[in-house]
Image: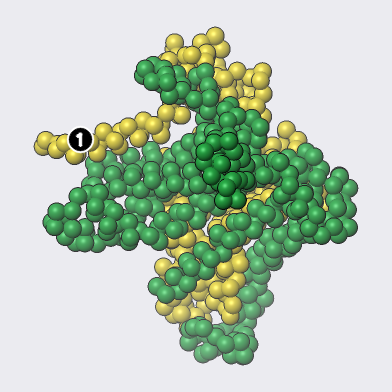
C-alpha cells in the first residue's frame, strides 16, 4: 500500500460529508489506505455478528435436533413448540419479573446514592469506589457469594435471627412459591367474569425465588446507575437548584421537580442498559441458583445453553436465541438511533 | 465544626450502604480464613479463630492452572483489542467515509446482542478452523466481539483530539500511517488504559464463551473452574469462598489502583462518553 504518497490539495481541505461521486474523485491512495485499515474489522463484524445471526436464524427454522446438523426447513415449528413449552413459558415470566424488579431497584438505589453523594460529602471518592466495586467482579463470583449469603439456614437469615427479626426470614432461592391470583379468589373470579381468567394462573405470578437473584444483581449493578446519575446531577446548573431551595423547596422536592426531569436521558440510558443486561442474564443464574425449584429461577439464556450444548437440540436452542435477540433489539435499536442522533446534534 | 442532624443522617446512610456493599466481601474473607471444622451454617458471621490461609492455599492449588489460562487468554486479547479499537477509532474520527455513521451504528449493535444468538455458528466455525477448545479460540472470540466497545471508546477519545492537528500534518505531507504513529498514538495513552482495563475486566469475568468454547478442564479459564469448584458438593465452603476471592483478585486489584479509568470505560459503555 502506497501510504507515503504526497497529499493532494484535495485531501488537505478537510473531509466534511461527501457525496459518493465526489468521494470517488477523491479516492486518493490515502483514502484507500484508510479503508483498508477498517475493512478487517468490518469483515469480522459482518461475519461474526451479522453472518452468524443469520446462520442462527437458519438453524432456528431447521430440523437440527441431534449432534449431526440437519438443515431441512421446518418453518416456524420450533418457535411454536417453544412457546408451548412449559419451561420456556416459565422463562418468559421469570424474565419479565426479573427485569421489572431489577431495573426498578437499581434505578431507585442508584439515584438515592447519587443524591446522597451530591450533597458535598467528605470522602465522596471513597464511598463511590465502595458502591461501584461489585461492577469489577464477575457474575460467577457474585453468584457464589450470594448463594451462601442467602442460604436458608445461614447468612442473611442468621442476621435477621440475631436482630430479633426472625419473622422476616425467607426461604430465598429455595422457595418454589409462585405468588399469583388464584382462580377461586374474589379477584380471580372478577377477572374470569371479564374474560381475563387466564391471568389468574402461575403463568402470570411472581416466583419468590427470583427475588434472591434480583438482590444479587442489584448489589452488582446499582453502583453503575449511581455513577450515571451522579454525572447527570453534576451537569445540572447549581443556580437552578439553589433558586428552588431559596424559594423553600425541600431536598426531596428539588430532586423530584427539578433534577429528575433533567435526568430523564440518564434514566433512559440506565433503563436500556440494565434492561438489556437482564434480558440476557446468564452467569449469575448459573452460579447462584441454576433452574431453581420448578424452574422458578430459570431464564432463556440458561435454557438455550443447556438445550443446545447438553441436549443437542440445536434448532430449539437457536430459536430461543433468536427470541432473545428480538426482544433485545426492540429495546436497543431505537435507543441507538436516539443516542447517535443526539450525538450528531451536539 | 458541628454536624447538623441532616449531615449526620447523610453520613449514617452512606456508611450503612457501604457496609451492605462490603458484606459479601466480608463473608468471603472471613469464611476463607476458617478451617473446615470452624465452618458452619450457623457461624457464618463469626470471626475466624486466627489468621489461617490453608483454604486459600487449597483453593489456589486447584485454581492456579486456570488462573494461568485466564492470564494467557486475557493478555493477548487485551493487547490486540486495544490496537484494533485504536485504529478503528482513528479512521472513524479523522478519515470519515460515506456511510461511516451507518457503519458505526451496525458496529455498535454488536455490543448489545445476546451472544447466545451467535453461539452455535461460533462453535461450529471454531471447530472447523481447529480453534475450538483452545485458548487462542477464546482470544479470537474476545477480540472480535470486543470490536464494538473498543472502537466506541477510542472514537469518543479521538473526537477530542483537534482535527486541525491532523489537517496540518496532512498539509505537511504526513501519511495516514504517519499521522497515526506520530500524532494520535502518542496522545492515546489514556485511551489505551481505559480500553485495556475494560477488556481485561470483561474478558477475565466472561463465563459464557469460556464455558462453551472450551470443554477441557486443562484449558478452561478461572471463571469456569470456580463455577465447577462451587458446584461440587465435596468441596467445603471455606475453600469455595477462598476460591471466589482468588478468582476476583486480579480485576479487584485493577479496580483499586485504576478505578478512575474503569469508570470512564463504564460511562462510554452507556454511550454517554
Left or right: B50, with B66 as reference point: left
Q: Residues within 10 Å of mark 1 (few under 14, many from 20)?
A: few
**Residue B154: horizontal and vertical position, in percent?**
50, 62
Q: Quadrant of residue A291?
A: top right
Residue drawn at x 65%, y 27% is: B231
Q: Position of residue B205 (x, y in %)?
A: 57, 41
Which residue bears the numbered disc 1?
Answer: B8
Quadrant of the image containing the N terminus of chain A: bottom right
Relative height, residue B156 to residue A100 (above, below): below
The chain shown in green is which? A
> Residue under mark 1: which chain is it in?
B
Q: Is residue B65 above or below residue A49?
A: above
Residue drawn at x 33%, y 45% is A112
Chain appearing in yellow on the rendered image = B
Instruction: Tell me the residue at 35%/35% (across/down).
Output: B17
- A22 or B106, which is in the foreground? B106
Asked if B44 appears above or below A290 in the picture, the reply is above
Q: Secondary structure at mark 1?
A: helix
Which quadrant of the structure image shows residue B55?
top right
Q: In the image, is A130 to the left or to the right of B150?
A: left
Q: Would residue A250 appear left or right of A5 to someone viewing this image?
A: left
Q: Quadrant of the C terminus of chain A?
A: bottom left
Q: Position of residue B103 (x, y in %)?
A: 60, 71
Asked if one can make out residue B265 in the rendered structure from this viewpoint, the answer is: no
Query: Residue B241 versus residue B96: which sits nearer the camera?
Result: B241
Q: Is residue B20 above or below residue B44?
A: below
Amino acid at each position: 500500500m502506497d501510504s507515503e504518497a504526497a497529499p493532494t490539495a484535495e485531501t488537505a481541505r478537510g473531509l466534511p460529508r461527501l457525496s459518493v461521486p465526489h468521494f470517488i474523485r477523491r479516492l486518493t491512495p490515502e483514502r484507500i489506505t484508510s479503508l483498508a485499515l477498517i475493512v478487517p474489522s468490518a469483515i469480522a463484524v459482518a461475519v461474526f455478528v451479522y453472518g452468524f445471526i443469520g446462520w442462527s436464524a437458519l438453524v432456528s427454522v431447521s430440523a437440527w435436533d441431534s449432534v449431526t446438523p440437519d438443515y431441512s426447513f421446518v418453518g416456524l415449528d420450533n418457535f411454536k413448540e417453544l412457546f408451548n413449552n412449559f419451561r420456556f413459558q416459565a422463562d418468559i415470566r421469570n424474565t419479565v419479573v426479573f427485569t421489572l424488579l431489577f431495573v426498578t431497584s437499581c434505578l431507585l438505589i442508584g439515584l438515592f446514592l447519587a443524591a446522597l453523594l451530591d450533597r458535598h460529602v467528605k470522602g465522596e471518592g471513597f464511598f463511590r469506589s465502595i458502591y461501584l466495586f461489585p461492577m469489577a467482579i464477575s457474575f460467577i463470583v457474585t453468584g457464589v457469594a450470594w448463594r451462601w449469603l442467602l442460604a436458608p439456614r445461614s447468612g442473611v437469615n442468621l442476621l435477621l435471627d440475631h436482630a430479633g427479626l426472625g419473622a422476616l426470614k425467607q426461604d430465598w432461592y429455595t422457595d418454589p412459591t409462585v405468588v399469583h391470583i388464584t382462580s377461586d379468589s374474589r379477584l380471580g373470579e372478577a377477572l374470569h367474569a371479564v374474560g381475563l381468567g387466564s391471568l389468574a394462573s402461575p403463568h402470570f405470578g411472581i416466583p419468590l425465588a427470583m427475588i434472591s437473584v434480583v438482590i444479587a444483581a442489584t448489589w452488582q449493578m446499582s453502583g453503575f446507575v449511581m455513577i450515571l446519575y451522579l454525572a447527570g446531577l453534576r451537569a445540572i446548573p447549581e443556580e437552578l437548584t439553589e433558586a428552588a431551595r431559596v424559594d423553600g423547596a425541600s431536598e426531596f422536592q428539588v430532586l423530584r421537580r427539578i433534577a429528575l426531569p433533567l435526568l430523564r436521558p440518564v434514566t433512559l440510558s440506565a433503563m436500556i442498559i440494565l434492561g438489556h443486561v437482564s434480558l440476557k442474564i446468564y452467569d449469575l443464574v448459573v452460579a447462584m441458583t441454576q433452574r431453581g425449584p420448578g424452574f422458578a429461577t430459570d431464564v432463556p439464556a440458561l435454557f438455550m445453553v443447556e438445550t443446545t450444548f447438553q441436549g443437542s437440540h440445536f434448532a430449539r436452542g437457536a430459536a430461543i436465541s433468536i427470541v432473545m435477540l428480538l426482544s433485545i433489539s426492540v429495546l436497543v435499536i431505537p435507543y441507538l438511533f436516539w443516542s447517535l442522533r443526539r450525538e450528531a446534534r451536539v | 465544626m458541628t454536624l447538623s442532624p441532616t449531615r449526620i443522617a447523610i453520613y449514617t446512610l452512606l456508611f450503612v450502604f457501604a457496609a451492605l456493599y462490603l458484606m459479601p466481601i466480608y463473608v468471603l474473607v472471613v469464611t476463607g480464613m476458617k478451617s473446615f471444622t470452624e465452618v458452619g451454617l450457623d457461624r457464618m458471621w463469626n470471626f475466624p479463630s486466627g489468621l489461617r490461609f490453608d483454604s486459600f492455599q487449597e483453593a489456589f492449588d486447584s485454581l492456579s492452572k486456570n488462573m494461568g489460562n485466564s492470564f494467557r487468554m486475557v493478555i493477548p486479547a487485551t493487547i490486540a483489542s486495544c490496537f484494533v479499537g485504536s485504529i478503528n477509532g482513528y479512521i472513524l474520527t479523522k478519515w470519515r467515509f460515506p456511510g461511516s455513521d451507518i457503519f458505526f451504528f451496525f458496529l455498535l449493535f454488536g455490543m448489545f446482542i445476546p451472544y447466545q444468538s451467535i453461539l452455535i455458528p461460533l462453535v461450529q466455525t471454531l471447530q472447523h478452523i481447529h480453534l475450538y477448545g483452545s485458548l487462542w479460540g477464546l482470544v479470537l472470540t474476545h477480540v472480535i466481539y470486543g470490536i464494538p466497545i473498543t472502537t466506541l471508546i477510542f472514537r469518543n477519545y479521538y473526537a477530542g483530539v483537534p482535527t486541525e492537528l491532523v489537517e496540518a500534518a496532512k498539509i505537511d505531507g504526513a501519511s495516514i500511517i504517519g499521522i497515526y504513529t506520530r500524532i494520535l498514538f502518542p496522545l492515546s495513552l489514556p485511551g489505551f488504559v481505559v480500553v485495556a482495563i475494560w477488556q481485561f475486566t470483561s474478558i477475565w469475568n466472561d463465563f459464557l464463551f469460556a464455558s462453551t468454547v472450551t470443554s477441557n478442564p486443562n484449558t478452561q479459564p478461572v471463571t469456569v473452574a470456580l463455577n465447577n469448584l462451587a458446584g461440587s458438593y465435596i468441596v467445603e465452603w471455606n475453600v469455595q469462598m477462598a476460591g471466589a476471592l482468588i478468582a476476583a483478585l486480579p480485576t479487584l486489584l485493577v479496580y483499586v489502583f485504576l478505578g478512575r479509568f474503569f469508570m470512564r470505560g463504564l460511562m462510554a459503555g452507556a454511550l454517554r462518553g
